[in-house]
Amino acid sequence: MRSTLMIIIAMVLLPSVAMAEPSRIPAGRAAEVQRAVLSYVQQRTADIGCETRVKRLTISGNPSFPAGTLDYEVVAPQQWEGWGRAGISVIVRKGARVVGNLTVWVEVEALVDMVVTVRQINHGSVIAATDIALQKQDIAAVQGRYLARTEDVVGKKARVTLRPNAAIRIDQLEKVPLIRAGQLVTIIAENERMRITVTGKSKSAGAEGDTITVQNLGSLKELPARILDSNTVLIVF
């Protein structure tokens, strides 16, 4: 609902939109082109769940528009996500006949809730809930790389120093190891009919959910196991 409202507000403000060559494009036709572009942007970003705002829209080209109803087809670069800056084409048709081809330069702000830091987080620090918050920021500013849930961040370790009020990316985080290499662990081996518990030794370090190699101290066999907690691993057979 709010995204739709933002589009309506943008359309109301269209007379202030910049045009590269305004002298020969009729105002009514320019508004039609702008509405076609705004509709395309809304459709392109619908699945993101963002609030979109066209910050700049510049029309280049001065076709001779025929009278009557015209149709506008928006063709954007394949890699364009619907936000940020782009040069897109607008093909103008009257019925089946192409009567114009415009270049429209747009800059679209797309605001989504993303996890940001509220203070500087130093390299190697484990992130707490008080270190972060959800804020609306422009996807273009982070090249589309962001985290939308605080639970994906809390308890992780910062791989780099994170500056205040910055969106956090997944590649800036790492899991905190629960088990270290050489540690004695409890191995739970189970299937639908039975469950066996033995003592083993981890051959590598890992965090919760990671799969590591463990050695059964009774049989000396080495098997892959998933880490459940700081002392327990699971083998499903």
Image: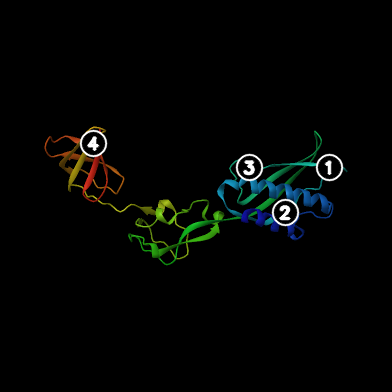
**Which label number is shown at residue 77?**
3
Instruction: Give the Cα separation between the discs numbered 4 and 1.
Output: 70 Å
What is the quadrant of the N terminus in the image?
bottom right
Q: Amino acid at mark 2?
A: Thr
Q: Which mark is residue 190?
A: 4
Q: Are marks 2 and 4 in contact (CB under 8 Å)?
A: no
Q: Earlier in the sequence, mark 2 or mark 4?
A: 2
Find the distance from the CA under tag 3 to the CA under tag 4: 52 Å
Question: Eyeballing the image, is 162 above or below 234?
Answer: below
Sequence-wise first label, 2 or 1: 2
Q: Nearer the viewer, mark 2 or mark 1?
A: 1
Q: Are marks 1 and 3 in contact (CB under 8 Å)?
A: no
In the figure, is residue 16 to the left or right of 55? Answer: right
Residue 129 or 89: which is nearer the viewer?
129
Foreground tag (1 vs 3): 1
Image mark for residue 58: 2
Label 2 to label 4: alpha-carbon separation: 64 Å
User: Disc 2 to disc 1, how far (Cα)?
Assistant: 23 Å
Q: Residue at x 52, y 57 (%)?
A: 113
Question: How far, Cα to Cα, is label 1 from label 3?
Answer: 27 Å
Say what amino acid the circle numbered 4 marks: Glu
Q: Residues within 10 Å of mark 4 (few under 14, many from 20)?
A: some
> What residue is drawn where x is 87% and y is 42%?
68
Amino acid type for the residue under numbered disc 1:
Thr
Q: Report whether 47 appears left or right of 16.
A: left
Please report whichever mark, 4 or 1, sits nearer to the chain's N-terminal start: 1
Quadrant housing residue 67: top right
Compare marks 3 and 2 and give the one earlier in the sequence: 2
The answer to whether 83 is drawn above or below residue 196 in the figure is below
Mark 4: which secondary structure? strand
What separation in Å lies between label 3 and label 2 (alpha carbons)? 17 Å
* Kind of element beneath mark 1: loop
